[in-house]
């Protein structure tokens, strides 16, 4: 039965990676894979020789000797445990996405266009790279890419130039997301999973992430694509709403407040995110001058409110397919973890992976090569399941350097292919960037940044 579950997982995983070839949204195989894996566990529960206790991070003793009812009860408790942990991530993301959409409702991001006062390509490149690096740490790399590519389309009219800028935005956004607990889904997973804390994450990864962004940008500044000036194009800095700047700063401040709230109260991050969403939504309702209604759905008053309310409008624009994809993939990985498959794989990996000298290892016995390969793998395969798998494979304590290296590798390694990160995929869709063009023109820059940043991490970890 274990072989059947692994086969289902591999086939589902393959369908996710081949999303663009088979024309099936990755959400579908993720949900099907999750449901079938847990169904097979329920049907073959009597056959499994071991069970992994996620709360204690160890294999359960005498699992084979338990009665059938006890095994079923244990499976239900484990399923509920993983659903709870996954839901923490999903509710957190829902809150963050809604705040970002509320900012966009007031055209808050148009305020950023005011920072761009030059026509020199190399200067514009640095402005976009730094904005991507900072914004992605606050509103996540996917959203930062959407915002900056939208602005890019209004500023750079020539498509050939525009896709070069977009390539460097992807690198910068992924680098910026790696050092913030709210900058990337995978980093958020490690943070909510109590593997890293905000202070240590920033301390370990701020310099490596900045170098990962800065080195490719410096090299790109000398390439022909970024020589000269934009041809006779005006930068439009007008905003559509008098509350644009206010909502931008309020929304970003509310998101930044979440790690502070967690530090003070020790409550899960999604609680702070809901508080931030409530505050931002309150101001949004006031500024929009819409009529507040608690009437039942379907009434004329409720419909009118839904039409004009910025909160309702923002909730309708959230990427629910992405949320359901995360649900499917995280719960599918949890199925493998519960059977002890990931635990056994991690032990085999650590025993067989060659060492690169005593100085090139992290954690209590995990080779740096393993983590670097995870980063390279995240360019080919979605980094969410890779990090989800690592949570079940490795069991080092909170703030161990292993978790920070995984956060860096998974966050920045995806830049090497345009399909390797959410930021790359969304830019590919918005600007119709060709896979092979990116592979030829941008991938080598991303690889250099990844390696140089990894070397910088090996230095910064010696400071802690």
Image: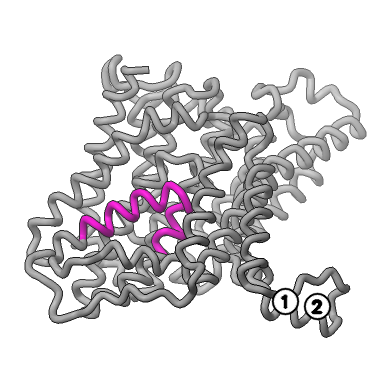
- 136 within the magenta span: yes
Find residue 76 and report its horizontal and vertical position in percent: 83, 40
Find residue 215 and report its horizontal and vertical position in percent: 19, 45
Residue sitting at 45 percent across and 77 percent down?
240
Could you tell me which quadrant the C terminus lies in? top left
Residue sitting at 32 percent across and 55 percent down?
131
In this image, 201 relative to 96: left or right?
Answer: left
Q: Which residue is mark 1?
A: 306
Q: Are marks 2 and 1 in contact (CB under 8 Å)?
A: yes
- Location of residue 212 with respect to 128 vertically, above or below: above
Q: Nearer the viewer, residue 105 or 125?
A: 105
Q: Nearer the viewer, residue 35 or 80?
A: 80
In this image, 375 relative to 44: left or right?
Answer: left
Query: Which quadrant of the figure has residue 449?
Result: top left
Q: Is residue 136 visible?
A: yes
Crowding at dot 1, Cα within 10 Å, few <14 / some 14-19 / many 20+, comes out as some
Q: The residue tagged with tag 2: helix, strand or loop?
A: helix
Residue sitting at 25 percent across and 30 percent down?
456
The overriding secondary structure of the stretch rendered in magenta is helix
Crowding at dot 2, Cα within 10 Å, few <14 / some 14-19 / many 20+, comes out as some
C-alpha distance separating marks 2 and 1: 6 Å
Q: The residue tagged with tag 1: helix, strand or loop?
A: helix
- 156 within the magenta span: no
Residue 302 - label: 2
In this image, 461 relative to 74: left or right?
Answer: left
């Amino acid at each position: 039965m274990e072989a059947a579950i692994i086969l289902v997982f591999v086939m589902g995983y393959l369908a996710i990676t081949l999303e663009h070839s088979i024309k099936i949204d990755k959400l579908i195989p993720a949900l099907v894979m999750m449901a079938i894996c847990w169904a097979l566990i329920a049907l073959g529960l009597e056959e499994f020789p071991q069970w992994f206790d996620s709360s204690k991070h160890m294999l359960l003793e005498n699992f084979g000797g338990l009665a059938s009812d006890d095994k079923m009860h244990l499976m239900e408790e484990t399923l509920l445990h993983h659903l709870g942990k996954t839901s923490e991530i999903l509710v957190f993301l829902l809150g963050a996405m809604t705040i970002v959409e509320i900012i966009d409702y007031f055209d808050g991001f148009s305020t950023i266009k005011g920072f761009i006062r030059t026509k020199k390509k190399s200067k514009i490149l640095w402005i976009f790279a730094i904005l991507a690096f900072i914004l992605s740490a606050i509103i996540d790399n996917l959203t930062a890419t959407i915002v900056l590519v939208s602005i890019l389309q209004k500023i750079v009219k020539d498509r050939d130039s525009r896709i070069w800028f977009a390539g460097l935005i992807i690198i910068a956004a992924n680098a910026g997301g790696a050092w913030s607990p709210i900058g990337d889904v995978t980093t958020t997973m490690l943070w909510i999973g109590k593997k890293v804390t905000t202070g240590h994450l920033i301390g370990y990864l701020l310099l490596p992430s900045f170098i990962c962004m800065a080195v490719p940008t410096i090299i790109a500044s000398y390439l022909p694509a970024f020589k000269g000036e934009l041809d006779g194009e005006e930068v439009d800095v007008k905003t559509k709403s008098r509350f644009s700047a206010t909502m931008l700063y309020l929304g970003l401040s509310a998101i930044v407040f979440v790690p502070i709230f967690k530090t003070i109260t020790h409550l899960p991050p999604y609680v702070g995110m809901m508080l931030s969403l409530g505050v931002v939504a309150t101001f949004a309702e006031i500024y929009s001058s819409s009529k507040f209604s608690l009437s039942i759905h379907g009434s004329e008053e409720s419909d009118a409110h839904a039409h004009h309310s910025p909160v309702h409008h923002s909730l309708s624009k959230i990427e629910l397919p992405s949320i359901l994809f995360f649900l499917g993939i995280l719960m599918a990985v949890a199925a493998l973890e519960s059977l002890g498959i990931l635990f056994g794989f991690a032990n085999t990996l650590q025993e067989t992976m060659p060492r690169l000298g005593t100085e090139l290892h992290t954690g209590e016995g995990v080779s740096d090569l393993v983590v670097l390969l995870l980063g390279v793998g995240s360019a080919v395969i979605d980094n969410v399941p890779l990090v989800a798998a690592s949570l079940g494979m490795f069991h080092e304590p909170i703030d161990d350097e292993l978790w920070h290296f995984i956060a860096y590798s998974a966050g920045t390694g995806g830049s090497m292919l345009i399909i390797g990160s959410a930021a790359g995929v969304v830019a590919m869709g918005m600007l119709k960037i060709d896979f092979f063009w990116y592979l030829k023109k941008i991938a080598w820059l991303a690889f250099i940044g990844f390696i140089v940043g990894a070397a910088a991490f090996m230095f910064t970890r010696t400071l802690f």
